[in-house]
Amino acid sequence: MSKAEKGPESLRKAQSTARMTKYGLAAVFLLGVVLLLVGIHGQKVYDASGFSSESAYQAIYALGDDTASAWEQVLRPSFGNLTEEERSLARGIALTLLTADWEGRRAGGGEDASALAGTDEALTWKLLYASYLVNGPKVSASQRREILSSSAPDEPGYRLMVLHGLLSSDAPLPAGARSVAEGLSGPERQAALAQVLFVASGSTSGDVSDHTALLKKSVRDKGRQVDAFRMIGTGGLSWLQRLVVSYSRTVMLLGVFLMLDAGLLALLMRAEGTWRMDLKWILVLLIADFLLFFQLMPIVYMVVRALFPEGSFTLKTLERLYTESMNLDALKNTLAASFATMLLGTLIAFPLAWLVGRTNLYGKRFFRFLFVVSYMVPPYVGAMAWLRLMNPNVGTVNQWLRALFSLSDARGPLNVYTLPGVIWVLTTFYYPYAFITISRAMEKMDPSLEEASRISGAPPLRTVFRITLPMMTPSLIAGALLVFISAASCYGIPSIVGTPGNVNMVTTRIVEYVGKGQQELNDATGLSVFLMGTALLVLFLSDGLLARRQYITVSGKSVRPVLVDLRKGRLPLTVAVSLFALVVIVLPFLTILATSFKTDIGKSVTDAGNFTLANWSGVFSRSETVSCLTNSLLFASAAATVGLVIACVMSYLLQRTRLRGRNIPAFLITLGSGTPSVVIALGLIMTMRGNFGVNIYNTAWILIIAYLIKYQMMGMRTVVSAMSQIHSSLEECSQVAGASWFTTMRRITGPLIFPSIAAGWFLIFIPSFYELSMTTLLYSSTTKTIGFQLYEYWTFTSEPMSCAMAFGILLIVVLLNFVLNLLTRGEFSI
Amino acid sequence: MAAVKIDHVTKSFGENQVLKEFTDTFRDGEFVTLLGPSGCGKTTMLRMIAGFEKPTSGQIFLDDLQVSGGKTFIPPEKRNIGMVFQSYAVWPHMNVFDNVAYPLTIRKAPKDQIRKSVERVLEIVHLSQYAKRLPSQLSGGQQQRVALARALVAKPGLLLLDEPLSNLDAKLRESMRFEIKDIQVSLGITVVYVTHDQTEAMAMSDRIILINQGTVQQAAPPAEIYNHPVNPFVADFLGKVDFARGNAEKGRLVLEGTGQSVPYAGGRQGKVLVAVRPEKIRLSPSEGPLEGIVESLYYLGDVSDLRVRVGSVSFRVITAPENCQSLRPGSPVHLSFRDMMVFDDDGSLDEALRIRT
């Protein structure tokens, strides 16, 4: 049926659709405004109450990891300093939390409850009473019976007794609590006290080293209860009011985004001249909202925090930061190490790429595979291997060298715990980045360009310098910059290799500061801004370079490119490349493998009695390993799946539509992948704990989102390039044949780009699976991943066991790569 | 003196033999074209002369000096050859002057001599005013000239051209054709030219070597190869042709499927294959040995292009428009062959022709 036949009726329909859409948008916008206002009101009430879970977080950071048994010393005096009003409020909070916790334990099993109460009958009693006070009618019948059957206690006295009971229990207290409590006033002090109580309630069965994590968790779990208590304390509010007040920021956030989206949608629709609601708009907006909130906002927030630490503009933070010698060293080290790694990596990568790509070197395919494979090895595994090899005392290479040159020293000659050591390990891990970039460009280069030089009279080597090298310059620089920024934002290698030798890098300093807490969080921000700035500069440079100097050459039919005959150099060069591969790839892997079978890491694995399978069985029989592995698989799958959905939508929008604003999400995604991992993690830490309406701190979500931000670009790029290969006429043809958009996607486009979709999924999955830098900052006791577990094993438990784990991870990654290869019929592997 | 001598050269890539027993001698100053369908081995032969490939067996001599074969192999950079690639291979990071000067720079010629030579050769290819431009600022045809200038600047004795015109548009291709020929004549240089375009080959060559499936079919000057092809493949590849099976006896040739015959003075007897070019057929309302019916008729301006059905055989006829003004599809017409090529019918025709596609 043609449009003309439908006539005025369809026109009327269209008009009414447009009207409906406009009204709808206006309604959504208004709803946003209302929500924003309600949220602001809630926030005012919240602020007026003088307590906030945010300051509780700040106090947690101030506490740090240090533990000591200074209950009496710290809490008693500080408690004594409180005014009567403050004291009662703090007590109230303590009771609330304690009760809730106790009840939780009770529900979980009587054992825990009695363990908490101990043999002290009085404490049990007190707890029960506290429970009654807070929960009132919600107390179960049996509890009430117990309470009623006891002699009637005087209320304030018992409150005090409960606290006293807590104070005199011998649970450890973070040392930092004292200074915090003394230096704080009013609501902040209350918060600090509350956190001490969190520790008390949370750590009775916990591991001492997990205090910070427990604290964070308890604040997250109980923040709402704190708020609720405060609401009760500050006057009766209805449940709705309480909800609004407790979640004022979430309500505001919702309002802001509704307004933003409605406005944006209206603008876009007007620009397009259509008022038909389309799923595509919603998708774009959802992705844009997601990226704006989880990616851009944290980074902007961090920059703002670095420049406005106290609410007004000051460079004090930066000044303090960059005048401290340790930081200055870290800055210098980072720049020096990244620069050296870049130079060294590129110097290695270019000849390798040329030899493997353009000459008749023996075993080229094998070497190529080897160099590319090392791209997907987790960096910390390499770092571990080089520690074993170049440890100044027991390093295998050092032992060999000492034996070889009959050196009598007990140390050296090589020491990995130095700046050159860090540079070496960084280079061995990051040169593949340059190798892959340069190789790809070499493959794309028209071989006639080199042949033309040969026939003009230039021998092979001169051709390399006069033609190949200049032609490769853009990708050479791009590869070099990639190495630079990867080295600068690497955390795994400097933390394993550099920190023991006091070679600090910006990334390790940031993580250290984050561990320390509040004031230092500002410092971490300052350093992050530096790292972020460097990364952005590099991103900008390489983008500009590539865009401007990408040589496009007309290429004829592809003849078999003439391979440069190395003649006499063929064997020696093959030996040289083999040696390189042996030292840089085979030796480290073998070391990891050998170490994983050792009982005594100081001896050779072939020594009598030194061979054991215990490390392997030990690692993989532990339930913690299994749960970490499950976590890793789960988080990485989630990140990969969400990332891929975004990638597909984005590549559709980029390749198939001229939708306004489609480049904004694409730009944000690119920006995210260029942001150093620790910066992403720090940004999320600072913004995702409820202060902006979303509290995913210490959950799996924060990890998944971090992985997404860092790695989804790889997925997007793969799918976009696949999509660009499919001419839109294939889809148009299907639509002409009568298929709907969805059917076309399912029957035509989907199957054609499936290999790339699979590849994109794995490209996000694999690095997320073994991620360390971000996980170090974002994990909680329930969301540890295999990468972090390995790091913990290496640092705290046993090197052989961590090596077994590292090799296990490596095997999984290789296996995944194999699966990918099968799935895409050999079209893709990393 | 023979510029190039190729002696029983065979080339295989693994199992796949792409060139079989190629033997020929190119005279000094000769314009030789290697012609054939794609994949016939002509580019491989050119690349062996250049030194980018080594023959599997056989020898190649340049100016009577052996450059390939046996243990001898002189690399391309020492052969003093000029070459133009299909993709031009103009280096994008050098300007026109530097591109062209490259062969002389490599030979470490004095600066002023380089300048003089480059200016002269740029003059020849009409690019003098573009010397400072980058290749990305040039059109395809101009890049092509840069490549040509670069190949000529060192005054090589031999110029190799690998389908140099195939990336140009039709008009430019035609004018470049004559330009290249003019340059070759004025410089007196030996040229080996590879193409799959028969018109190019006809227009430029002193001699065409037609190759199919790695085997030389015929090597002869354009007129010779056009008018006297040695086999049906050659006849079909160069120019347009229609085939008919026939039987030769007693001065007549009976065309199969028509029941009609044409006079035949040649010496073949029995089953034959007749090949007729469309421009060699005369149309007449009443005169001529063959009677047919016009199937289709297209007026193309300079000529008219007809199909005439004679029995079950159809012939294409190209003739001046005034010869067929009165004809319409369906009109009866008489045909006579001004010239025809007769081959023994060994039954291999279909196979030979299939190769073209």
Image: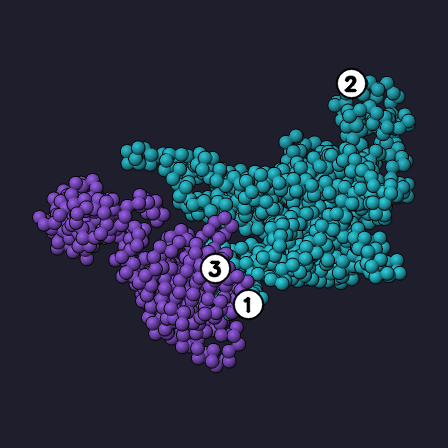
Chain colours: A cyan, B purple
- Residue under mark 3: which chain is it in? B
SS category of the residue bearing label 1: loop
- Residue under mark 2: which chain is it in? A
Q: Nearer the viewer, residue A660 or A26?
A: A660
Residue to which mark 2 is pinned: A141
| Distance between mark 3 and mark 1 Cα atoms | 25 Å
SS category of the residue bearing label 3: strand
Mark linked to residue A459? 1
Residue A53 drawn at (x, y percent): 73, 41
* View extreme (left): residue: B286
Residue to which mark 3 is pinned: B58
- Residue under mark 1: which chain is it in? A
| Mark 1 residue crowding within 10 angstroms, few (<14) / some (14–19) / many (20+) | some
Marks 2, 1 in one chain: yes
Picture quadrant where residue B22 is located: bottom left
Disc 2 or disc 1, which is closer to the eye?
A: 1
Asked if residue A368 lies left or right of residue A426, the reply is: left
- Residue lying at 44% horizontally and 54% vertically, measured from the top left: B19
Asked if residue A9 lies left or right of residue A206, the reply is: left
Residue type pointed to by label 3: Gly
